[in-house]
Every structure is written in structure tokens, then in C-alpha cells.
Image (cartoon, grey):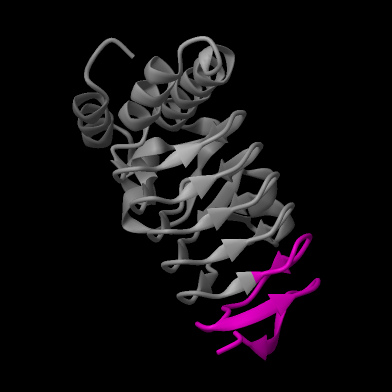
Amino acid sequence: MTQNRTERFEALLAEDVDLQRLVAGDWIRYRTSPALQELTWDAHATCTTINRIYYDNQAEAERLFHELIPGAGEGVDFRPPVMIDYGARLVIGDRTFINADFLVIGGGTVTIGSDCLIGPRCGIYTPNHAQDIPRRLDGWELPEPVTIGNNVWLGGSVTITPGVTIGDNSIIGAGSVVTKDIPANVIAVGNPCRPVKPLPA
């Protein structure tokens, strides 16, 4: 993108119906939206640059990361590779650590709290495609928000599906698939992920 990302986002928002629907939390058609494709292309290209230069020029990689994700707080630490569809739709709290192979797919708002530990190969998926055949063939999808509270620990290879909230301090065991909300202060595991016991005192 040649313009400042925020300015470009606002310009696209003024002209693209699907981007307007995305911001409103409504159904979108990514495949027919030039704006959504431009935004994700830019984000993927930036992630590719971050991943390529991280170990040669960490300061520049971190600058690009924060430029792509203006909602990333102070002291956010990450390891490449990362792949993010929409940096403007992602908020990451202070001091959160993100391990390698972090993936955020779709345009639903993703909010990650402060002091979180995100294990390697974790994926956050926000879009639900239409279930009825004609609308799915037409490309309709509904991005839903994902919210991860403060001080949450996601083990390696955790998958989080659209619309899920994970409460503060909870631990999600490695390999879990989170399809429903998880309350605060629990240890939860499995596919589908479910609370198995409270955090130790």
C-alpha cells in the first residue's frame, strides 16, 4: 500500500460494501471484494517480510509488526513465522508472548489480552462460511469476533474457532480445539475443548 494503512483502510471503507459489512459484523463476500483482497494481500506481504528479516534485523521486523497491527501493546514479543489477514482487526495486550507459526484468519475482530502466552502453531479462525449450498457457492461468510482474556496460556497447536471467548487466567491444553466459550480461571483441554478443573490456588 502506498498510503498510510489507516488512511487507505478509511478510503476503502468509503467505497467497498463488503468492507462496510465486515466492520458492521455482517455477512461478506471476500472473493468478490477488491478491498478485502487488497487488505489481506498487503498484510500477507508484510508478514512475509517480517518472517524473512526477523533474525537479521529484529528491530525492523518489530517495527513492521507494530505498523501492521496498530493495536499491539507495549512489550509484545513474537517469533516468526506469523501470518495475519487483517492487522487492523487484531488487538494484542501488553507483554503478551506469541510463539512461532501464529495464524489469524478472517476479518472478525480478535482481541488478545495482556500477559498471555501463545504457544507454537496456534490458529485463530474467525470466518464461518454459509451452510446452505447456494450462498456458500456465492462466497458468503460471516466473520465473528474472538476474545482471549488477560494472562491466558494457550498450549501448542491450539485451534480457536469463530465467536469464542476465553476468560482471564485460563489454560488451554496443547492440541485443543476451542469451539465454545471457556470461563476464567480454569484448565480446559480436548476436542471439543472443555474445562476439566479450576486453576490451582
> Which residue does the image show at 38% across and 19% down from the upper left?
59
**Can the viewer see residue 126?**
no
Q: Position of residue 74 (x, y in %)?
A: 29, 44
Q: Assess whether residue 196 is covered by the magenta stretch.
A: yes
Is 79 situated left or right of 57 in this image? right
For the magenta stretch, what is the residue range?
172-201
Q: Nearer the viewer, residue 38 or 73?
A: 73
Q: Assess whether residue 173 is covered by the magenta stretch.
A: yes
Q: Position of residue 50 (x, y in %)?
A: 50, 20
Q: Position of residue 55 (x, y in %)?
A: 56, 16
Which quadrant does the N terminus fall into?
Answer: top left
- Residue 103 against residue 152 in the figure, above or below: above
- Residue 95 against residue 46 in the figure, above or below: below
**Can the viewer see residue 23?**
yes
> Which residue does the image show at 45% across and 65% down from the upper left?
147
Q: Nearer the viewer, residue 13 or 167?
A: 167
Q: Position of residue 78 (x, y in %)?
A: 51, 37
